[in-house]
Image (cartoon, grey):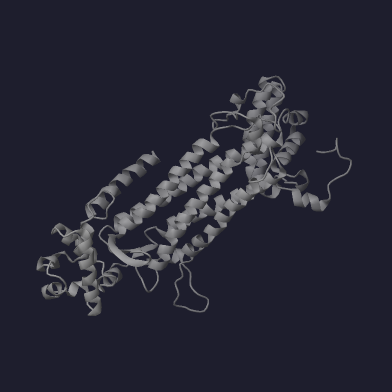
Amino acid sequence: MWAGRFSGKPDKLMQEFSQSVSFDQRLWKEDIQGSLAYAAELQRIGILSEKELADIRGGFETITKEIESGKFEWKVELEDVHMNIESRLTELIGDAGKKLHTGRSRNDQVATDFKLWCHFRTEELHGAVRDLMTSLHARAEDSVDVIIPAYTHLQRAMPVRMAHHLLAYFSMLAHDENFLDEISRWDTKFDLPLGSGACSGNSFPVDTKNLFMGVFESTARNSMEAVSNRDFALNLVFGCSKIMSHLSRISEDLILWSTSEFGFVTLGDAVTTGSSIMPQKRNPDACELIRGKTGRVVGHLMALFTTLKGLPMTYNRDLQEDKEAVFDATDQTLACLRVMALVFSNENFQVNRERIQQQLDSGLGYMEAMNVADWLVLQGVPFRDGHDITGRLVKYVESKGMRFADLTAEDLKAVDERLKPELLNELSLEALVERKQVYAGTARKQVEARLKELKDWLGNEKD
């Protein structure tokens, strides 16, 4: 490839050090797609004849079959996916293959390939997020009648329906899906790099609007920026990092919920493992691995930022380091989304209703206290005064080792005259849950309404 300028060959160590074909061969479909579009434009402006264009198309059909069957020979000495494919094309069809690179540089070629690849992986991530949301919705429908403690500062705070808790995960993922929609629209469909050449544009009268390949909607506005821009890769890895941070938070909840101390859920055999020494163990490996892989994906984001932060215009070989970060971040995120959907399948997510009820009956956390404060407000007591009275009531039951469920009218009166006997009818977790009748609240009517809305939304998304 460099014979015209160099008389010697790169050292074998340098070949191994600088090659990227071992990982960028994943771009082969996009490379062929971009080359076919570019070849058609070269034929339109007279660089290629109709026969040469037909030969190129036929050659790429052969190469596609070879790659898909595993018969294609990837050569390190040809450095990357682009030169491997071009070299094989030339072997197959002769001089027409040599003409394909006319006016084109590997700089605009790789930017185009990579941008296409990121676009298709964004769509794949979008589908995986939606599949997980579907599983979460199904488990939420199953658990509308289950009340669990909600926690702030990892201390019991207020009771909520388990469905409400699961729909919080759904909302987190909805933010992720919206972000994927945005990056697909702004970073991947727009600003086609192909036709920008090495850095200054194309020397031949190609019309870049003819190169959109059914994906892009506008051409690059500046050739220098086009070949060096990797914002689309940053956005994709940021999207993966955001998804992973959400999955990690979900995993942490499930790890806690599945402990003996909580016992809210039992995770199925398909997503747990045992111990090599303790036969009784059921370890939440799926959730722990997802939590662990989050650092790996976020690390890729920081690595990519660091690679890009000091690069001068335009293309620099440092940009070869972008792909492994993006490839692995995307691979890990897709795998984690699919595993988490498996965790929330009907077979692997068992809600332990009796254990949860035992936890609630224990009275730990005094979650009924909020009902006391609210009830006092409805009696005309200013909230801050009600807060003080309720705090004294909590201190009273705590000092006597009681539960709120054990309180009597005499106990209430001993704390404050404003605590009337009719308050005893309000001291249930169900009553507190049902007070939350606002749109985003955890009352049954509101949760069921959100479930219906989200089911309709999921159906529309699939359409």
Q: Residue at x 34, y 42 (%)?
A: 457
Looking at the rendered image, the quarter that the C terminus falls into is: top left
Q: Left of 159 or right of it: where is 16?
A: right
Q: Left of 190 or right of it: where is 170?
A: left
- Percent x, y for residue 264? 34, 67
- Percent x, y for residue 343? 42, 60
Can see residue 148?
A: no
Q: Residue at x 19, y 72 (%)?
A: 405
- Observer-nearest residue: 346 or 315? 315
- Observer-nearest residue: 417 or 153? 417
Image vertical order of residue 217 relative to residue 14, above or below: above
- Percent x, y for residue 196? 66, 30
- Percent x, y for residue 206? 66, 23
- Observer-nearest residue: 309 or 60? 309
Looking at the rendered image, the quarter that the N terminus falls into is: top right
The count of marks equals: 0
Q: Left of 102 or right of it: where is 190?
A: left
Among the 4 quarters of the image, the one containing residue 34: top right
Among the 4 quarters of the image, the one containing residue 407: bottom left
Image vertical order of residue 30 relative to residue 430, above or below: above
Image vertical order of residue 384 relative to residue 277, above or below: above
Q: Residue at x 62, y 33 (%)?
A: 193
Q: Residue at x 57, y 58 (%)?
A: 296
Can see residue 385?
A: yes
